[in-house]
Amino acid sequence: MVKRGLILAVVVAICDQWTKSLIRGMFVGMPPGHRIPITGFFDLTFTRNSGISFGLFNNGAAANPLVFTVIAAAVIALLIYWLSRVETGLLAVCIGLIIGGAIGNATDRLIDVGVVDFLDFHLGSWHWPAFNIADSAICIGVVLMLLEGLLSRRGALPTKESGDLQR
């Protein structure tokens, strides 16, 4: 299971960095906040978030990249340890997605002093905070992990037929 999770983590991190490289190239020389409309509800944009999710702590503090990278490294180490103890393929995939996303965003902090976000979904003038492939992988990994936990527990519940429930 470790191999499966780590391979997926590497694939996610590479895809994340590749797409961010493409976006950096597309937006060279464009003014901050420029958007490239793709559909009526989706644009490409180029932002750097020196904070954490949804722009929290995005205050430009010089220590942010170092602090958040150290935290990410600790989380990645804990996730790798957890991955080494996992017995199901789905949970290995979930953890691999989260590790890959964390590596992708930590790499940005080291290279760009902030995470590159470029996927901009909106409804009229209301915009969801821009995000990237790493953020998507982390969210998908967490949601699948929650579902896996719920489904595996549901299968372990006693049934009336087994006589384990009391009235």
Image: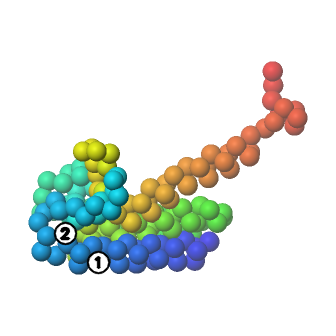
**Badge 1: residue crowd in 10 Å (few <14, some 14–19, many ≥20):** few
Q: Nearer the viewer, mark 2 or mark 1?
A: 1
Farthest top residue?
A: 167
Label of residue 42 in the image: none
Circles 2 and 1: CB atoms closer than 8 Å: no
- Residue carrying label 2: 113
Instruction: Establish if 119 lies above or below 158.
Output: below
- Residue carrying label 1: 21
Q: Earlier in the sequence, mark 2 or mark 1?
A: 1
Asked whether, in this view, residue 83 is left or right of residue 71, the answer is: right
Looking at the rendered structure, the number of numbered marks drawn on it comes to 2
> Label 1's element?
helix
Residue drawn at x 68%, y 50% is 152
In the image, what residue type sits under mark 1?
Ser
Residues under labels 2 and 1: Cα distance? 15 Å
Instruction: Establish if 5 lies above or below 53.
Output: below
Viewer-closest of 1 and 85: 1
Measuring from the top left, give residue 25's x and y in whole percent: 23, 78
Snapshot quadrant of residue 110: bottom left
**Which colour assignment does the render follow?**
rainbow
**Badge 2: residue crowd in 10 Å (few <14, some 14–19, many ≥20):** many
Measuring from the top left, give residue 146's x and y in whole percent: 55, 49
Measuring from the top left, give residue 143's x and y in whole percent: 51, 52
Snapshot quadrant of residue 70: bottom left
Residue 117 visible in rendering: no
In which quadrant of the rendered image does the N terminus lie? bottom right
Asked whether, in this view, residue 91 is left or right of residue 30, the answer is: right
Residue drawn at x 58%, y 74% is 4
Measuring from the top left, give residue 10's x and y in whole percent: 46, 77
In the image, what residue type sits under mark 2?
Val
> Label 2's element?
loop
Viewer-closest of 114 and 80: 114
